[in-house]
Image (cartoon, helix red, strand yellow):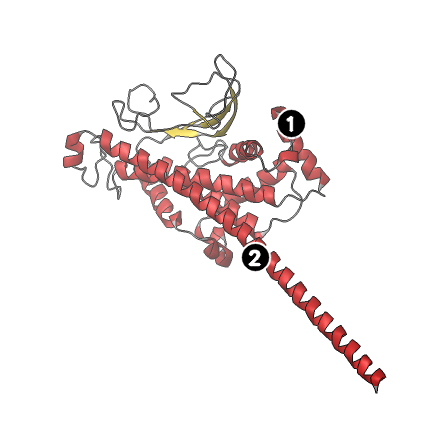
């Protein structure tokens, strides 16, 4: 009787121990999920904070555009078919002023989306992929960096510069291709077609692309995505298939830059892209140093690498604008190229 009672007690304790272990494992899993959710939330919060800062910057630039416009331009806004300089626009649906504000907003979104793509890419590096790691370290080696500090801002900025070099290649060409020729020879028809394409693609979502693919919405944009993705994969030596998260981040970045190009060539005079070569003298009026708060050695600084190109609308017959000239005396707006100075 006592023996049976003891056996029952042991079985009960064993059962309680198993239940306790199961409860512990469940609790640990729940904690791990919560930790993962918090990390994801933290990343999204950081993304939103950066996005808000970019929007604030774009808003300040747009406000400067309006403030700098002559009073008569504000009291007598251009009619449909006229630019703010009085040049006929032949029924463009919006004024050039509105197009400028839209362009500044897309610039901010493009910068943010490329930054997010680079963060996503770095977060998915497989350290067992030695070929990929060696290729990336070789790309970073000229700048005395390596992936050992892959979460540092410097590595992300240099990677961003490499990605932007690929995404913005041939931006100056009217069809975003080397030696490409536009399909519509009539300048006004060409501008209208580009702006219509911009409007059609502006709100294209990732879910829509998943359902029908980019080619369904724009064959040219689809070719651009394929070409740029292939170029990035080759440059980085990436051999594994991209995850959906990485594909989505790439799509958002590629779409923003494609929209920039469409809008840039929708103006009466296409907007200029501003690039900066390595080792040229740093000019604060025309360039934005990403690490401006960092102490540098005395003497004139030189550009180490261009992270993000700038852009401007040249005024007819005017000198190229300086920092802060948003439809000021030169009637130009100017987006500074982002660079790193040594």
Q: Is residue 145 visible?
A: yes
Mark sitting on residue 321: none
Find residue 216 and report its horizontal and vertical position in percent: 46, 54
Q: Is 66 on the left-hand or right-hand side of 285? A: left
Q: Is 161 on the left-hand or right-hand side of 318? A: right
Find residue 312 and report its horizontal and vertical position in percent: 36, 28
Q: Which of pointers 2 and 1 lies earlier in the amino acid sequence?
A: 2
Give the quadrant of the N terminus: bottom right
Mark sitting on residue 34: 2
Find residue 242 and report its horizontal and vertical position in percent: 60, 48
Q: Is 6 on the left-hand or right-hand side of 63? A: right
Do the residues bearing badges 2 and 1 touch, measured as CB atoms within 8 Å? no
User: Which type of secondary structure does the marked residue at label 1 adopt?
Assistant: helix
Closer-to-camera residue (254/155): 155
Q: Is residue 183 visible?
A: no
Give the Cα distance between marks 2 and 1: 38 Å
Q: Is 70 on the left-hand or right-hand side of 128? A: left
Which residue is pictured at 42% across the width and 18% down the height? 283
Within-10-Å neighbours for mark 2: few <14, some 14–19, many 20+: few
Above or below — where is 52 with respect to 287? Answer: below
Q: Residue furthest top?
A: 299
Closer-to-camera residue (38/214): 38
Foreground: disc 2 or disc 1: 2
Which quarter of the picture shows residue 77? top left
Q: Which residue is mark 1?
A: 141
User: Which type of secondary structure does the marked residue at label 2 adopt?
Assistant: helix
Closer-to-camera residue (127/13): 13
Which residue is pictured at 78% across the width and 81% down the height? 8
């Amino acid at each position: 009787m006592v023996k049976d009672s003891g056996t029952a007690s042991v079985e009960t304790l064993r059962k309680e121990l198993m239940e306790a272990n199961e409860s512990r494992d469940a609790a640990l899993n729940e904690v791990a999920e919560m930790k993962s959710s918090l990390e994801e939330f933290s990343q999204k919060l950081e993304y939103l904070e950066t996005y808000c800062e970019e929007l604030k910057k774009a808003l300040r630039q747009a406000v400067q555009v309006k403030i700098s416009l002559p009073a008569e331009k504000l009291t007598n806004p251009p009619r449909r078919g006229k630019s703010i300089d009085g040049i006929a626009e032949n029924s463009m649906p919006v004024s050039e002023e509105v197009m400028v504000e839209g362009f500044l907003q897309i610039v901010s979104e493009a910068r943010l989306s490329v930054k997010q793509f680079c963060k996503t890419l770095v977060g998915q590096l497989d350290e067992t992929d030695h070929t990929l790691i060696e290729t990336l370290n070789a790309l970073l080696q000229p700048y005395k960096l390596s992936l050992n500090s892959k979460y540092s801002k410097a590595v992300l900025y240099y990677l961003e510069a490499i990605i932007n070099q690929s995404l913005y290649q041939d931006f100056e060409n009217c069809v975003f291709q080397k030696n490409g020729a536009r399909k519509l020879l009539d300048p006004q028809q060409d501008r209208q077609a580009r702006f219509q394409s911009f409007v059609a693609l502006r709100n294209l979502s990732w879910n829509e692309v998943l359902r029908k693919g980019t080619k369904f919405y724009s064959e040219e944009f689809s070719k651009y995505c394929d070409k740029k993705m292939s170029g990035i994969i080759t440059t980085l030596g990436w051999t594994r298939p991209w995850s959906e998260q990485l594909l989505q981040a790439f799509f958002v970045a590629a779409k923003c830059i494609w929209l920039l190009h469409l809008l840039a060539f929708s103006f009466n005079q296409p907007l200029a892209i501003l690039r900066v070569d390595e080792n040229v003298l740093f000019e604060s009026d025309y360039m934005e140093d990403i690490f401006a708060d960092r102490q540098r050695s005395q003497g004139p600084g030189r550009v180490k690498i261009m992270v993000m190109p700038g852009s401007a609308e040249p005024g007819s017959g005017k000198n190229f604008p300086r920092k802060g000239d948003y439809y000021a005396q030169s009637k130009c707006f100017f987006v500074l190229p982002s660079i790193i100075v040594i």
